Amino acid sequence: MPPPRVIAPFHGEHNHRKCLDQAMQRAEAACLQQGVRLTELRRQVLSLVWENHSPTRAYDILARLKEKGRRPAPPTAYRALEFLRSAGLVHRIESLNAYVGCADPMVGHSSQFFICDRCDAVAEVHDTGVTEHLTRNAERLGLHTARHTVEIHGICTRCYHNDQT
Ligand SMILES: [Zn+2]
Ligand SMILES: [Zn+2]
Ligand SMILES: [Zn+2]
């Protein structure tokens, strides 16, 4: 079994421009590989999700698109978001009804998400051991697993230390 892979750690201070550039490059490559098109609107929605490492809600994306002078009908924007999700470019954080960008969309994966409730940062780990363990349990119970969601909430180290000082 491959070791757990950290797809996105909790970021401290960092140059986010690099994350954004890399995410857009990888999104292009992933779309090329899948034979799907990253249209202008899809690209714009993706870059809005990637403005930071916190989950973004669909209505925030609509509001930001309006600020930028684009006024797509809400269903159009939601469809763009759904496209990004199905292409693996963003993940939906179910417990927050919001989306985060995936830093490694080339590899299909069902990840585990770690969420800081203080600063909203989200870290992503791909641990096939967790997935297999859960699938085995589901089988034991008689459930044919379609999808699974693992979201762990807490306080990240940075916020924890800020609390102490
Ligand atoms: Zn970043
Ligand atoms: Zn991912
Ligand atoms: Zn935090």
Image: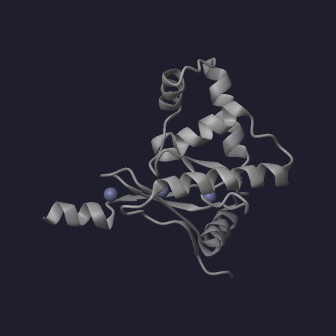
Q: Looking at this rendering, what residue extends furthest in the left direction?
A: 165
Quarter of the image for the C terminus: give it: bottom left
Residue 12 in which image quadrant: bottom left
Residue 45 appearing in the image: yes
Residue at the (57%, 50%) spot, across then down: 101
Quarter of the image for the N terminus: give it: bottom right
Residue 143 in which image quadrant: bottom right
Residue at the (48%, 40%) spot, across then down: 56
In front of the other: 122 or 135: 122
All told, the count of numbered labels is 0
Indicate left or right for 90 with 98 as reference. right
Indicate left or right for 140 with 149 as reference. right
Q: How is the image coloured?
A: one colour
Q: Position of residue 150 (x, y in %)?
A: 53, 59
Q: Position of residue 104 (x, y in %)?
A: 65, 61
Q: Position of residue 89 (x, y in %)?
A: 66, 49
Residue 72 in which image quadrant: top right
In front of the other: 15 or 74: 15
Q: Looking at this rendering, what residue extends furthest in the right direction?
A: 35
Residue at the (56%, 51%) spot, across then down: 20
- Whether 134 is drawn above or below 94: the answer is below
- Whether 134 is drawn above or below 32: the answer is below
Indicate left or right for 81 with 108 as reference. left
Residue 102 appearing in the image: no
Residue at the (18%, 60%) spot, across then down: 163
